Amino acid sequence: MTTNTSIKTKPVSIFNAAVIVAALGYFVDIYDLLLFGIVRTDSLKDLGLVGDAIRNQGEFLISMQMGGMLIGGILWGILGDKKGRISVLFGSILIYSVANIANGMITTVDGYAFWRLIAGIGLAGELGAGITLVTESLPKEKRGYGTMIVASVGVSGAIAAYLVYQIFKDWRLCYYAGGVLGILLLFMRIRINESGIFKKVAESDEKKGDFLSLFSKRERFFKYLQCILIGIPIWFLVGVLITFSPEFAKALNVEGAETVSAGQAIAWCYTGLVLGDIGSGILSQWFKSRKKITFVFILLNLSMVFLYLNSYGISVANFYLICLAMGFSVGYWVLFITIAAEQFGTNIRATVTTTVPNFVRGLLPIIILIYSFFRDQLLNGNILNAGMIVGTLLSVIALLALWKLKETFHTDLDFIEQNN
């Protein structure tokens, strides 16, 4: 008598090495990315700036950082598809660790701008490479949970940045701490394996990392553009409304507005973002849909923007609670990046997943210019009305972009993007 036995494959855990290391890498990434917003005022005062110069130079420096991320997003994305996801995870963290340490040594605004640019280039590779590796390493039934873990652990880096600043009370030491964390993380990455899906494509003659192919076909270009536009309300909220929260608190006549700090607002916002990423990730798994949950969160985000900009005369505590709620409303960040990863083939997936979030971040200088135009040219300095107009405009654009994209929850990622 013979017995037929089937070979059982070991189930893949959502807490595998790729997920854990990607999550910790994104943690350090967000620590550095948001640290500038936390130390902006004190660091610029220490460099001798006063009054409106702090706001104006702050906008300039954050624009340099985001511009660096725009450049880096393209470079790291192409490298990720040509040489592998692991190479990006190593290279990006090395560059922004060095830039972090250098930021702690600057003595001029020009030096500050240069090293924020370099830091931005380094930061650009971390999230896209990590999400690509995780989505390719997990089965489709679990990859939403994997990206949720990466995002929720990662964005808590902003909370860590605020706590470190509260402990050290020295913006230079905070930058040094970020650099040391990044270097330590390098040693954890030695044993990570490349995704099997990428290895299969790497051995083929298929053209990989062809960034220009995203523009060679009308359908592919518009799909790529839509992936970017879905995320623009997120960075308007974080990069403008939260980063410049002290100015908004004064305009709203918040009780004790002079005590509102951007660092604390960022910490509250990112606490909400952690909860939002977990919530959106779980809901997308339950409802088996990325689009439906993203749609709900974009609408929630718009409603929170209006609540924030109409909260006249509230207490500082309630102001921070609204920052928390605003953070929760942009918790579709993880879904937005997962959608981008699932839309395109393996031979260009890292390019897309790395460039999309960085184009969103890199568009912040343009968003700030649009916001400044409404504020200064049309509304005589009214930052509240300017915020509501720009917030509404960006949300409408995001909803239209999402509407035209296909649902990707059940998509098998083992496919090639044809370049012809």
Image (spheres, helix red, strand yellow):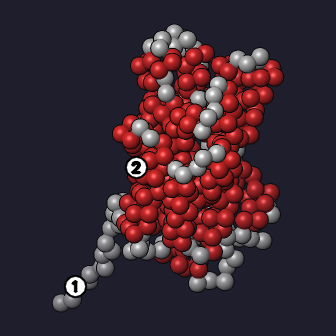
Q: Secondary structure at mark 2?
A: helix
Which residue reaches farthest top? 313
Depth-wise, is mark 2 or mark 1 nearer the camera?
2
Q: Quadrant of the N terminus?
A: bottom left
Q: Which residue is mark 1?
A: 3
* CB atoms of marks 2 and 1 within 8 Å: no
Q: Secondary structure at mark 1?
A: loop
Residue 3 x/y as whole percent: 22, 85
Please, is residue 343 above or below residue 89 in the view?
Answer: above
- Circle 2 crowding by C-alpha within 10 Å: few under 14, some 14–19, many from 20: many
Q: Which residue is mark 2?
A: 153
* Residue 54 image-quadrant placement: top right
- Circle 1 crowding by C-alpha within 10 Å: few under 14, some 14–19, many from 20: few
Viewer-closest of 219 and 150: 150
**Residue 275 bears which disc, if any?**
none
Q: Residue at x 75, y 66 (%)?
A: 213
Viewer-closest of 79 and 335: 79
